[in-house]
Amino acid sequence: MAEAPTDPLGELRAAVVSAAAGLDGDAGEKLSLERPPKAELGDYSTNAAMLLAPSLGGPPREIAERLRGALAGTLGDRAERIEVAGPGFLNLFLSDRWHRAATAELLAAGERIGSPGLDDGSERVLVEFVSANPTGPVTAASGRGAAFGDSLARLLERCGFAVSREYYLNDAGTQVRLFAESIAARMRGAEPPEEGYAGDYVRDLATELAEAAATPDDLDELARRATETMRVRIQATLERFGVRYDTWFSERALRESGQVEHTIEELRAHGHVYESEGAVWLRTTAFGDDKDRVLIRSDGEPTYFGPDIAYHLDKVERGADRLVNVLGADHHGYVPRMRAGLAALDIDPERFEAPIMQMVNIVEGGARAQMSKRTGEFVTLDELIGDIGVDATRFFMLQRSHDTAIDIDLELARSQSQDNPVYYVQYAHARIASILRKAAAEGGAADEAAIVEAAGSGRALGAAAEASERALVRRLLELTGEIEAAARRRAPHRLCAYAMATAADFHAFYRDCRVVGAEPALEAARLGLCVAAKRTIAATLGLLGVSAPERM
């Protein structure tokens, strides 16, 4: 695994740990190094002294005084002063030179800025997401799962995991049969069955397939052709949305391969299958489920559960170490039963996880659009993209935690104002690009490489820093930790908040500090900070699947 970029915050934490060790103390894993809520409390604050007090046998403030002296010696000129506060906190006021050197280290990371290095590529993570039935267009609701799954995959890749993206194509079973029956009815000029699909897209698809010599008399062939047609359209929509898959896995192919029967026999061999009332059951209650589950109905038809266990066994046999399924809001009971199914095969159920997406509401003029694929009353992802664009769609989809319902206000998403969060962040990136173009036009550094070199010079490292500059540096240093937290917690929404906070800090810096035309040492240092901010914003937006424009 390539060595992770230098982390100034990690080095600062190591200095605290080293100072504690000098007192014969160990602060342990609970040691914190955080930004205080108010600027007058310092750049960072640590609870190390309070953690050391029990083992060193003294009052926390007394230990804090001792630690302050040790830490001052460790940090040297990197700290302006260190103060003891409250019950024993140490507040660190770091020097301008520390902030300038931290900027230089951010710049030295290059394209690897914000890379936590959690894994060396040995852990293989299979992220399955969207996987909507190929019985209609991708809805806006499914678009949320697409944005989340793709962003999570990007985060995991950034952290060093080997990631595969997969779409499970539910091209067999009851819903596909109803879809075929609905198309066949339209081909005959009749209404779809009561539980079928009534959208206009079904009528259009019936006409298209009839023109391609499909017949309503062969429902199996009609189902194959219809679901493949929809798969192609789903793929086109998702690629338009910036989502590409490594694998499209067919449920029909799984069933036809005999893998479902093989899996049920494996479960039977493990002693967890029994028959009752003419049906075949899996004793999932032995593994924490609230009731046993039917694998094969009394009429001989398999439930969805048997093929799903077979599918997840196939994932494991293909080498996946961790199985991440991004599921819709109606799948809350799915997780315990799938874990039970895996445990029945002696597969560690903790390898399976399933973030569950809550609802998406499309709002315009205070009214919400209805969502029903069967009735045809829904907003498609293509329609939403066509209205507000890919960037706004993805950002708004990801702005809230996946376990919280979201409202997408179309009027806000369309606006080109600072009230629109994605516009606000993108504008910061474009503004930085404009500053760099101006610097080059006025005879300054011609490219980012030259700016990076100048920002690392002794002259630039010695330049004074305004409060808003220091605040921006500290914000940029949080990128690695934010990426790690977003990946570990399956929380891409953290990056939306971080991107907005970074943009706000940059705008404040630009308001307070002259960049182009400042005294040479200051200009070099500030241009370097601009490049670091530009790279940070671009990296954050990239992990969200949102573009970082050079001009707006």
Image (cartoon, grey):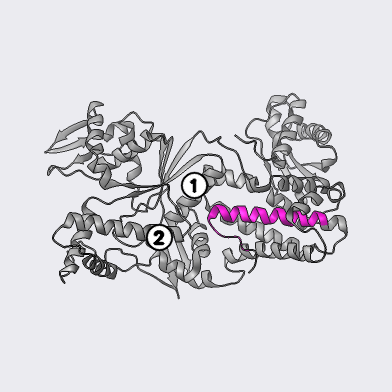
Residue 383, how many percent across, how many down?
Answer: 41, 69
Note whether residue 95 is visible: no
Residue 520, how many percent across, how many down?
Answer: 87, 58
Q: Which residue is mark 2?
A: 236
> Image check: 494 left or right of 45?
left
Label 1 or label 2, whichever comes before in sequence order: 1
Helix, strand or loop status at disc 1: helix
Q: Quadrant of the N terminus?
A: top right
Residue contact at pointers 1 and 2, CB within 8 angstroms: no
Mark 1: which amino acid?
A: Ala
Q: Residue at the far bottom: name it.
A: 365
348 in the magenta segment: no
Looking at the magenta stretch, what is its main secondary structure? helix
Residue 436, how many percent across, how many down?
Answer: 74, 62
Residue 91, how many percent across, how many down?
Answer: 76, 43
The magenta stretch is 524-549
Q: CA distance from mark 1 to mark 2?
A: 19 Å
